[in-house]
Image (spheres, helix red, strand yellow):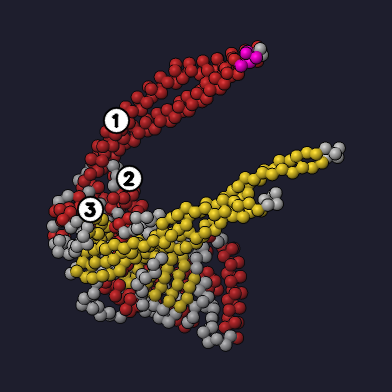
Amino acid sequence: MDDKLLEPLEAYKRSYRSEFEKNAAEYFDGLAERSGISLEANRKTVASYDAKMKKVNELDKRLSRNKGARTFLIILIVVGAILLFFGIGGLLQESYLTGGLCLAGGVVLAAVSLGVIFGKIGPALKRMEAERDKRKAEADKYLKEAWAQMGPLNALFDDRATRELLKKTVPLIEIDENFNMRRYDHLCTKYGFGEPLDPNRSTIGILTGEILGNPFVVDRELVHTLGTFTYSGSLLITWTTSYTDSDGHTHIQHHLQTLVATLSRPKPYYSEQTRLIYANDAAPDLHFSRKAGHAERLSDKSREKTVKTGSKKIKKLQEKAMTDDDPTTNFTGMGNSEFDVLFGAFDRDNEVQFRLLFTPLAQKNMISLLTDPAGYGDDFAMRKSGCLNFVSSEHSASWDLDTDYRRYYSYSADIAKRKFMDFNCAYFKSLYFDLAPLLSIPLYQQHKPQEYLYPESYPRNFTPYESEYLANRTGAQAFCHPESATPSVLKTEFLEREGKSDRIRVTAYSYRTEDRLDFVPTLGGDGNMHAVPVHWVEYIPIVNTAMAHLKELGLSEKEFDEGAASGSLKDVLLGCGILSRGYGHGILCCTTADDSSIENKLNDISKK
């Protein structure tokens, strides 16, 4: 075991962050060396391109200013024409002074404006546009040359780089190529991990692995919830009233009022949720939960006040536990008020096992994690349910799980390196600090799982989570109803195993819409009820199903993309009659014209 991980925050600050950056930089530099490109030549070309584009941008700004001036002068011409119109009108009505002034002013304003436009600004714009086009053409030549220089390096980027960097930096964290059946069987049979059965949730991102044999899953889901939306409409009403003044005269008053009415109607909402699930046999009877509190945002004084106030709550909970006849109520403070208050697991149900987990070192680690902004601070919720631990963090919402190699493509080696470093360092930090609450508990690292006997074979090749991910990777348009007007939640059902392929049914849940009009009775200022029209949208559930096939090819995404673009792989895919396809984690998901099996056609694809 890596002793550094016993204090995960300190390990990240003192070691892992810099080690990962160093490994990533060396990895990129190694690719650049393998590619044989000249970094200096590329930098020189990029510098020339940047210099030319700087001139282009300067000309664009000057063009914008001159076009703005031309627009202003056009407005003055319009004003001049208006003055001219009023001047002629005044003269016709024998208002010679006013008419003459308007006429003269209009003529001068229009004439001067036209003169400036056609005599100065127009020619200047033509010259600048010609110069701008010339410089842009020169810049494009340098850009084309820079892309050509970077071709060999861009060709070497691969989606496996991130996993290799993680393994090199923290060898104890193993990342799987995909969520395979062995991992799934271990989690389900031994730890009670369940199938993704909820039709309101669909896996759109998945990452699995283990730490010292203890498995974990990062699952990103598209989540559907049904809420309401308030629509509004308006109606203008008029009425008259009369009154008599002090002199006995009757007057009529005209009234205007805009009536506004609202309607609340059902509307579907869609969001993404990411969670990490970690399985460990330690403290198997313990359950608790805690919410993010952002203790890292508190000053020392505010934190002391928070702990002092929270200590009173702890005292009341202990007093209640002593007087409560319910045997399950046995809350006892840890003796470390700062940990108890900031961590906030007040619903724990097994004090003995809670203390086994949260030793003095674990408490120290957790307090550091919650209060130090070096990571993400206290931005995570955590729940333990027996052997399963669930971590949901705010930072994981922006964690890009897709290690698409094309994100590094650039005409500049320096820009490509910055993209490579930024993405991979952010990826590592996000994963590390989702694991950090678990790594902060030394017992979890010291507790290795008992040996698990895996079956020799499984009835299916691919897990339901991986199947959902791949269906979403293929794209909802391949499965959704043609009348769908909302995102589709895709669920998969295993149908049959065909050798090393699986045939699945994909069900897409979505809504079609119908425009509706209701009239809402609303009391007006005239004392009468009025029917105010409110337009709203009705969301009508629809379901569509389609068949798909899954087969593991074992190719990286780059290898698949290159093979599918040309060569024998392209020919084989065409021969399969594929209508739509998605590829990820080394697995192909596709729909075919006649739903025929792809097993035999793709048997030797990884060798071609």
Q: Secondary structure at mark 3?
A: helix
Q: Which residue is mark 2?
A: 415
Neighbour class for label 1 at 10 Å: few (<14), some, many (≥20)?
A: some
CA–CA distance between discs 1 and 3?
33 Å
Where, by quadrant of the figure, is residue 508 drawn? bottom left
> Looking at the image, which residue is at 29% across and 42% down?
412
Marked residue nearer the N-terminal end (2 or 1)? 1
Q: Which quadrant would the C terminus be assigned to in this image?
A: bottom left
Residue at 83 percent across and 37 percent down: it is 249
In this view of the protein, which residue sits in the foreground, 120 or 289?
120
Q: List x then y, in percent, for residue 94.
A: 66, 12
Instruction: Please state the extent of the stretch shown in magenta in the rendering.
Output: 89-93
- Disc 2 to disc 3, C-alpha distance: 23 Å
Q: Magenta part mainly helix, strand or loop?
A: helix
Please indicate, yes or no, whether residue 99 appears anywhere in the rendered image.
Answer: no
Residue 534 is covered by the magenta coloring: no
Give the answer, above or below, for where 367 lies relative to 84: below
Q: Amino acid at mark 2?
A: Ile
Mark closer to the observer (1, 3): 3
Foreground tag (2 vs 3): 3
Nearest to N terminus: mark 2 or mark 3: 2
* Label placed on residue 561: 3
Q: Taking 146 as reference, is 78 left or right?
A: right
The residue carrying pointer 2 sits among few (fewer than 14), some (14 to 19) or many (20 or more) residues within 10 Å by Cα, namely: few
Q: Residue at x 23, y 41 (%)?
A: 149
Per the model, the C-alpha gap separating discs 2 and 1 is 21 Å
Question: Which residue occupies the foreground of this view, 115 or 517?
Answer: 517
Q: Is residue 109 above or below residue 68?
A: above
Q: Badge 1 is on which residue?
A: 138
Q: Quick check: 38 left or right of 389?
A: left
Amino acid at the residue labelled 1 = Glu
